[in-house]
Amino acid sequence: MKRKIVGSILCMAMLAGTLAGCGSKGGNSAQGSSPAGEAAGAGDASDASSGSEGEGAAQGKESVVIWDYFETDAQKTMMQNMIDGFNQSQDQYEASHVYVPFADYEKQLTLGMASGELPDLVILDGCGMASFIEMDLFGDVSGADINWDEYMEGPMSSTMADGKHYGIPFATNCTALFYNKDLFDAANIEYPDEDTTWEEFREMAKALTKDGVTGFGNAATGTDEGTFQCLQWLYTAGGDYQNITGGTDAYHLMQEMVAEGSWAKDCVNWTQSDANNNFVAGNLAMQQNGPWQIPGIEKEAANLNYGVTVLPKKDADSGQATSILGGENMGAVKQDDMSGAIAFMEYYDQTEVMIDCMVQYGSFPPKTEAAQDSYWTDDPIQKAFIKQLDTSIPRGPSASWPAYSDAIQTGFQEVMTSAKTPEKAAEDTQAAVDKVKAAEK
């Protein structure tokens, strides 16, 4: 299929070096948020796409090429099973997929827009889609035979602009609080639950920090993966992505717990996989992480005695803590003929197909009916994530999200390394965020 992208090639080339990933998985995640890590060169994507199209044509079918950044064995298996199912369900199209490393993903999309070398369908982190809709990467698929009204509002909104649909949500998730029951039992401490406050959480973490174990850790690396995990603390404190100073109490909590040794100081370099690996190894009593870690825990640490609950709320009078929505969308690349991409999305829109994929993937279906399947509603750990989803919000949404994320995560890094006081970090981050906001007008 011939790709025709409308827009300024010069602008795309300039943006290639500046866009940041949403939920950077770089070998680990998510999120947002699926893990990523195996290296692949920039040429791998275009070479593999060309080969796949030739194979499809040789079979007398029209090729549908999909880009993804999935890395775990479970995710790779899910993707291949989904493609096999689609190929067997009809005789007009032959789908294949190409792996592109997450760290290079948005750069390769931007370069592809300049060169015309693009797939038919892109699976990308939900928070990055608004930027690419604005850049004219995706085409309007509002006429597709999709059950639009059955999707959760938050994920669906990230695939839309000006009332038009440019794709569908693929997966949705959030982070919650994992805890090691054996460590809590040994310390004679009650497990955290939906009523746990920041003060109680902090006391738990302090009491559990001993004998080589740190009370709590998360992914606070200086990328959007870190923003994905840290931003909820700002929201729970009363701020948001444009109101940093309103959440200054979160900066105090982070800095003080790191200073006490009960919030792992190394987390400023941790990805979500790093946090999970430390939790599985018994180095953390609690971690903030997502449901995509569950398949790996079940496979590699089946005897780990752990639970999951919602993140701690600010105080007894507060409502349930906020979490940040993660997950991926499917976007149809804008071209003269998008029928193959649309056919694949319509296949995935089937409830049973979506359920099967998300069970393998380790995330939640973005359709309400699919999310009510007993796989999620009958399992106490999965139910905890469903409850946390009730108060989860998207990053942004904003076409300028990469710039917001850079500013916000810089502030978290400064706080957690004690490079600045909470007040100074909040003040400087607010100024950086205001600059991004002003540039949007």
Image (spheres, grey):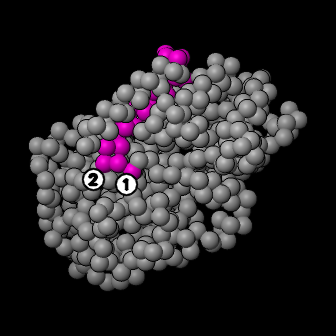
136 vs 326, left or right, is left
Residue hosting label 1: 124
Label 1 secondary element: strand
Gap between marks 2 and 1 measured at Cα:
10 Å
Percent across and percent down for residue 28 are 49, 42
Q: Position of residue 314 (x, y in %)?
A: 66, 38
Q: Residue at x 29, y 63 (%)?
A: 162
* Residue extending farthest right: 188
Vertical comparison of 250 with 136: above or below = above
Numbered tag placed on residue 400 in the rendering = none
Expressed as whole percent of the image width and height from the top left, the position of residue 114 reads: 14, 50
Q: For residue 178, what is the image quadrant?
A: top right
**In the rendered image, which quarter is residue 435 located in?**
top left
Image quarter hosting the C terminus = top left
When the figure is inspected, residue 86 is found, relative to residue 213, above or below; the finding is: below
Note whether residue 365 is visible. yes
- The residue that label 2 is drawn on is 132
| Camera sees residue 186 | no
Q: Which residues are magenta?
A: 397-421
- At horizontal 21% and vertical 64% (from top left) the residue drawn is 334
Type of amino acid at the residue the image marks with label 2: Phe
